Structures are given as C-alpha cells and as structure tokens.
Amino acid sequence: MLPISSGKLCQFLCVSRFPSILFLGIIYVAYVLVGGLIFWKLEGWYVLQQTDLLKEKRMKLLENYPCVGQNGIRELAQMIKAASLSGLSPDSNDTADGFWKFTSSSVFAATVVTTIGYGNIIPMTAAGQIFCVLFALFGIPLNVVVLNRVGKYMLAIERNFCDFLEKKIDRGKCVRISIHSISFVSSAFLYFVVPMLLFKEYEGWSYAEAIYYCFITLSTVGFGDYVADRNPAIHYPEWYGCLIAAWIFFGLAWLALLINHSIDLLESVNVYMRGRQNAQTQVEESKEQPEKD
C-alpha cells in the first residue's frame, strides 16, 4: 500500500471544504423535510376526505347501475380520474396510504426543488398551491447551489486522487484517463443499473421501462408516465420511498459532477489550444527577428 501522511490525507479528502458542504446539506435536508411536513398537513386531510367520498360514490354507483349504461360509464370515468389523483385504486379497496403521507410528501417536496415534477401528485387546496409556489421559489436555487457544491466536492476528491497517483506512477496521463473512466462507469452502474433492477423487482416494470424511468428522473424531465412508489395496488416497504429520494439527490449530484467535469475538460482543451497558439506565435516571431536584423 502507498503511504499517506495525515496532512496529505486531509488535503486529499478536501477536509477544509467539508464543514461548509455539511452545513449546506443539513439546511437542504431540513428544508425538504419541513416542506414535506407542511405539504402533509395541508393536503393530507383533504385526500382522506376525498378518499372516503369516492368510496361512497363507488358503492352508490354499483347500486344504482347494475347494468352500467352511458351515464354510468361517464360517471365511472370521472370517478376513476378523481381516484387516480387521490391515490385510490379504482378496482379495489386498496390505497397507497394516500399520496400525502409524510414520506410521499417529502419525496414530492424533493421533486419540486429538483424541478423533476412528475405531475402525478399535485396540491389540490389553495393553501397547498400557494405554498408550493413559495417553496419552489426558494428551494430551486438552494437545490442548484447544494448540488453544485456536492458535485465540485466529488470532482475535487477525484482530481486529488489522480494527482496523488500521478506522483507515484510514471504514466500520469494514462492514470488520469483510467481513473475518470472507472469513475464514470462505476457511477453509471450505481445510478442506472442498480435502480433499474430495483424498480423491476418492486414495480414490475420491464428493463426498458426501468432504465427509461431512471433517465427521465435524473435528467429532471419527469414526464410522469412512470413513477415509482405510486401504485396503490402494491404495498411498498417503508424504506423504499426514502431510498428513492436518496437516489434522486445523489444521482443529480453525480450529474452535476459530470457537468463540472465536462467544464474542466473544456477548460483544459482551451488552455492546451492557447498554449499551442502562443508557441506557434513565438516561433513565427523568432523567425521574423533575424530577417529584420
């Protein structure tokens, strides 16, 4: 093993940057959890009320329309639409504990500040809608700052690791390229392949649907046609929603790392091109100097 002193280890891990990132991370998590709590309180009672009302309407529909006619189909369609917005499965008595429980409200708050916005769960009260605007107004810039800092922190660790190996190994450039390649492949496996297998197991999606959902989510496109932890007919484990929220956050941080890394590569190419241009200019000036003499 290569010996590393405590000073070099602290420099390698960028310990001086860690307190500020930790402080921002605490503010970020607290902001999302408080937002989830407020959404839960504002929307939870309304969804429970609507769920009970929809159950009563379904029973009346079955009693009033033994042979469902056109009016029954129209009413049934309206009921199914309202049921999908409230987290009620229209073909059974099962629910997903309501969309506006604390965990789902926190995930919703995270999708707001990350601008994913699936659209499958929306505030339906005036108070919830107004709070959503205010929450996003301050949460989106906070999310950008935190993800940018985390991405730069991850990139700094990767750079320090490459610099350390370059000093120990002769072929520095090959090592740097190899480290970046390994980091990219392993991160892509962690944020795309592992979640794909998880979603196939718990959501019943195909591999194509799962990888599609991973990309649409981490790219913050968020169509909403596929959303994890939202099927009322499936009983999810308690840790499932928290794991998805963590995956979204660190996956977006990884994308921020890729963006910062791409900027770093472009800056390196720019410096290289400027160096070549300056060297060429110096050669031309040196050739012109004897002619003037």
Image: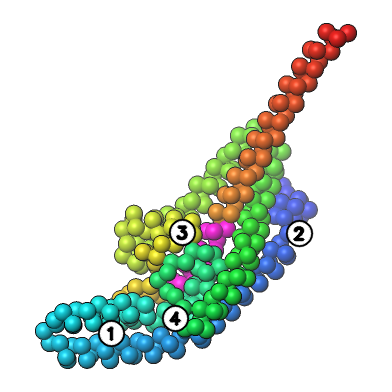
Distance between the alpha carbons at the discs numbered 4 and 3: 22 Å
Residue mark closest to the camera, 4 vs 3: 4
Q: What stretch is highlighted in magenta?
A: 239-253
Write down the residue under mark 1. Answer: 93
Circles 1, 2 touching at the beta carbon (< 8 Å): no
Residue in the foreground of this view, choosing between 228 and 239: 228
Write down the residue under mark 2. Answer: 16
Q: SS of the residue at dot 1?
A: loop
User: Neighbour class for label 3 at 10 Å: few (<14), some, many (≥20)?
Assistant: some
Marked residue nearer the N-terminal end (4 or 2): 2
Residue in the foreground of this view, choosing between 145 and 129: 129
Horizontal arrangement in the rendering, residue 164 relative to residue 32 (left or right):
right
> Can residue 170 be seen in the rendering of this structure?
no
Image coordinates of residue 96 in percent, x first then y, are 37, 79
Tell me the tag on residue 221: 3
Distance between the alpha carbons at the discs numbered 2 and 3: 35 Å
